[in-house]
Image (cartoon, rainbow, N blue to C red):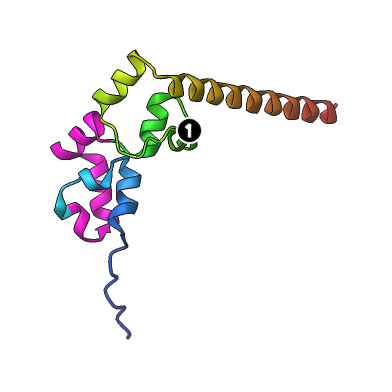
Amino acid sequence: MRMSPEKTPQTMKAATAAKKLGIYLPAAPAEFQEGPVTRATLNQLLESPPEWLVHLRLHGPHPREVMARKLGVSISGLARAGVTDALTTEEITALLKAPPEWLVVERKTQADVRAENRRVKDIKLGKAALSDD
């Protein structure tokens, strides 16, 4: 009878785990950044986040994806505006309270893109409904 070798746990790079957790990796504790993260560890962090993870998610600094979502712009919009550093929740709130010109322009661009995407989707749905008749 053959015994199966013990399975090695599935691991991922810290950067991948940070992305799944929605946090900015350089702001995470060193022990999180330094090694691979197992699937079990990631699940544990998702189910019962430690204080450092809760703090990072609430106060930042945030990764580009989160900054863009909170500001209502695209990641490309952040790049066009020259926003390269991670922002904290406080900094994002300040930008939203007194939006600079770039933020006004990028939010309008994002709104226009969303409206066009809705229009195209509605047209496709309309054509699909017509072909079903």
Evaluate whether residue 40 shows in this view.
yes
Q: Position of residue 121 (x, y in %)?
A: 68, 28
Q: Residues within 10 Å of mark 1 (few under 14, many from 20)?
A: some
Give the labeled residue for mark 1: 77
Q: Quadrant of residue 112?
A: top right
Residue plotted at (50% across, 21% down): 105
Q: Position of residue 23 (x, y in %)?
A: 28, 41
Q: Position of residue 111 (x, y in %)?
A: 55, 21
Apparent side of residue 126 relative to residue 45 in the rendered image (left or right)? right
Residue plotted at (23% across, 29% down): 58
Q: Is residue 59 magenta?
A: yes
Q: Nearer the viewer, residue 1 or 101?
A: 101
Apparent side of residue 124 relative to residue 97 in the rendered image (left or right)? right
Q: Nearer the viewer, residue 45 or 17?
A: 17
Local SS, label 1: helix
Q: Quadrant of residue 66?
A: top left
In the rendered image, which quarter contains the N terminus?
bottom left
Task: Point out the residue furthest to the bottom here.
Answer: 1
Magenta segment's dominant SS is: helix
The residue range painted magenta reads 32-61
Apparent side of residue 47 relative to residue 69 in the rendered image (left or right)? left
Q: Nearer the viewer, residue 2 or 105?
A: 105
Q: Is residue 53 magenta?
A: yes
Residue plotted at (20% across, 45% down): 28
In the rendered image, which quarter contains the C terminus?
top right
Q: Is residue 39 above or below residue 46?
A: below
Q: Indicate the amino acid at tag 1.
A: Gly
Q: Position of residue 4 (x, y in %)?
A: 31, 78
Q: Is residue 60 above or below residue 96?
A: below
Evaluate whether residue 50 shows in this view.
no
Q: Nearer the viewer, residue 110 or 78?
A: 78
Residue plotted at (40% across, 36% down): 82
